[in-house]
Amino acid sequence: MKKYLSSMTMVSSVQWMFFIFANTVVVPLSIANAFELPPETMAMMIRASLIFTGVVCILQGWIGHRYPLMEGHSGLLWGVILNLGLSASALGMGLETIGGGIATGVLLACGVTLLLAAFGGISILQSIFNPMVMSVYLFLLTFQLMFIFFKGMLKITEQGTIDIWVSLFSVCLAILVAFLKLKGNQMISNFSILIGLLGGWAVYALLFGNEAGGIAQSAPFTLFPLGMPNLEFGIVAVAFVAVLLNLSNTFASLTAADKLLKRKAEKKDYRSSMFITALFTIIGTGFGLVPYTPFTSTIGFLQSTRIYDRKPFFIGGGLLTIIGLIPVLGAFLSMMPVTVGNAVLFIAYMQLFGTAFSSLNGKEFNSNTIFRLAAPVLIGISIMNVSPVVFSELPILLQPFISNGLIMGMIISIILEKVVDWSAYEQQPMKHGKVS
C-alpha cells in the first residue's frame, strides 16, 4: 500500500511540475522578445524564472497561504509589460528606459504591499476587493484564459492562416483529455492532464516531428536585463497601479481555495502570502521577470485532478527548480509543442468557469441589479475582443489600462460597488434567467 501511495505521489508530482512549467516558460520568453534581448539573456531569464517559481511555490504552500496553489507570473502584469515594450516607438523611449521605469514602479508597489501586509492593510484591501468584485474578476479571468489557450492551440502559419492538420490534432487532443476526465476511472481522470501533455507531445513528435528550438546557452545571471531602475514617471505610474490591482489575485485565489478545500484562510495567511509574493517579485524584478501572484486558475487544475495533497505540489516545485539549475533539462522541456500545452490547459481551465459561477453563492439578480455583474463582465469581454490598435489615439500611458479588458472590468466593478447602493434595488429577484 505504501509503495502504491509513493508511486501515486511521484506521478502527481510530475503532473504538477509539467503544469507549472507549461504556465511559466512562455512568459520570460515573450518578454525577452518584446524587449529585443539576445538569446543568451533570454535563456538566463527562463532559468531564473524556473528556479524562483519552483521555490516560491514551495514557500507559499509551506509558510505562506499554505494551499497547493501555483505561484507564477501575473497574467495581468504580463499583458501590461508586453504592451509597454511593444509601444516603445510610439512612446518615443528606448526599451531600456521603459524597462527601468517598469522596474521602479514594481519595486515601489512591492514596498507598499509589504507595508499593507505588515500594518493591517488586509481589511482595507478586502473592502475594495469585495465578493462581487472577485466574482467579476473570476469571470473575466476565465474568458481571458480561454481566449489565450484557444488561440494557442491553433497553429498559425506565416500567411496568417491556421495549419489545418496541427490545429485539428490540438482539437482532438483537447477532446481526448476531456473524455479521459469525464469517462476514465478515478486514476485516469486524476492524471488526464499529465496523460494529455506527455501523450500529446509524443504523438505530435511522431506526426509532425520535434519542434525546433530549445533554450540557448545561458548568459551569467545579471541584474535588470530590461533596464536599470529610473524615474520615468509615466511608466513608473502605470507599473505601480497595475501591481496594486494585481493584489486582487491573492484574494480571489484564497477565497476560491477556501471553498474548494473547505478551509478558511485567516488574515495571517493573507499577510504571509502577500509578503512572499512581494519578496519574490522584488527578487524576480532584478532578473527581468514579470511580478508573481497566486494563480487563481490553479483551482481549475485542482478540480480536474482532485489531488489536493500538498506533498506532490512541493515535489513538483522542487523538480521545477532543479530543471532551472540544469540547463539541459530546461532545453529539453522547452521543446514541448506550444499547441499541445495550450490544448491541454484549455480543458483544465474550463473548471474555472464553475468556480466563477459558484462564487456568486446563488445570488439572485433583477433587471436593475444585474448591471452589477453584467456591466463590468460584458464590457471587459468586449474590450478583450477589440484590437489594442483601436485605442492608439488615446494618451499613450492610458492605453495599457484602457485596452486591457480584465483591468477595465475590475475598475468598473470597484467603482460600481463604491458609488451604487445596490441594496436599494434588490426588490424583485430574477430567477432562472427571467426578470420578475
Image (cartoon, rainbow, N blue to C red):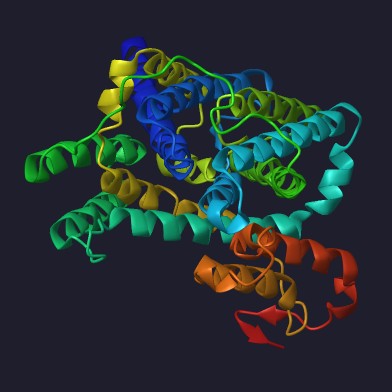
Q: Closer to the camera, 338 or 92?
A: 92
Q: In this view, does 134 lie to the left or right of 221?
A: right
Q: Closer to the camera, 173 or 357?
A: 173
Residue 129 placement (x, y as % from top left): 78, 52
Which quarter of the picture shows residue 120? Answer: top right
Residue 144 placement (x, y as % from top left): 51, 58
Q: Tell me if residue 411 comes above or below residue 278 in the rendering.
A: below
Which quarter of the picture shows residue 72? Answer: top right
Could you tell me which quadrant the N terminus lies in?
top left
Tell me which residue sits at (32%, 47%) in the image. Answer: 344
Which quarter of the picture shows residue 340? Answer: top left
Q: How many marks?
A: 0
Q: Residue furthest bottom?
A: 436
Q: In this view, does 217 lie to the left or right of 282?
A: left
Residue 258 placement (x, y as % from top left): 66, 40
Residue 236 placement (x, y as % from top left): 73, 43
Q: Residue furthest left?
A: 206
Could you tell me which quadrant the C terminus lies in?
bottom right
Q: In this view, does 97 lie to the left or right of 176?
A: right
Q: Closer to the camera, 354 or 62?
A: 62
Q: Tell me if residue 426 comes above or below residue 269 in the rendering.
A: below
Q: Is residue 52 left or right of residue 315?
A: right
Residue 139, can we see it? Answer: no
Q: Tell me if residue 384 comes above or below residue 68 in the rendering.
A: below
Tell me which residue sits at (27%, 58%) in the image. Answer: 154
Q: Closer to the camera, 45 or 361?
A: 45
Residue 116, can we see it? Answer: yes
Tell me which residue sits at (62%, 43%) in the image. Answer: 98
Tell me which residue sits at (66%, 70%) in the image. Answer: 394
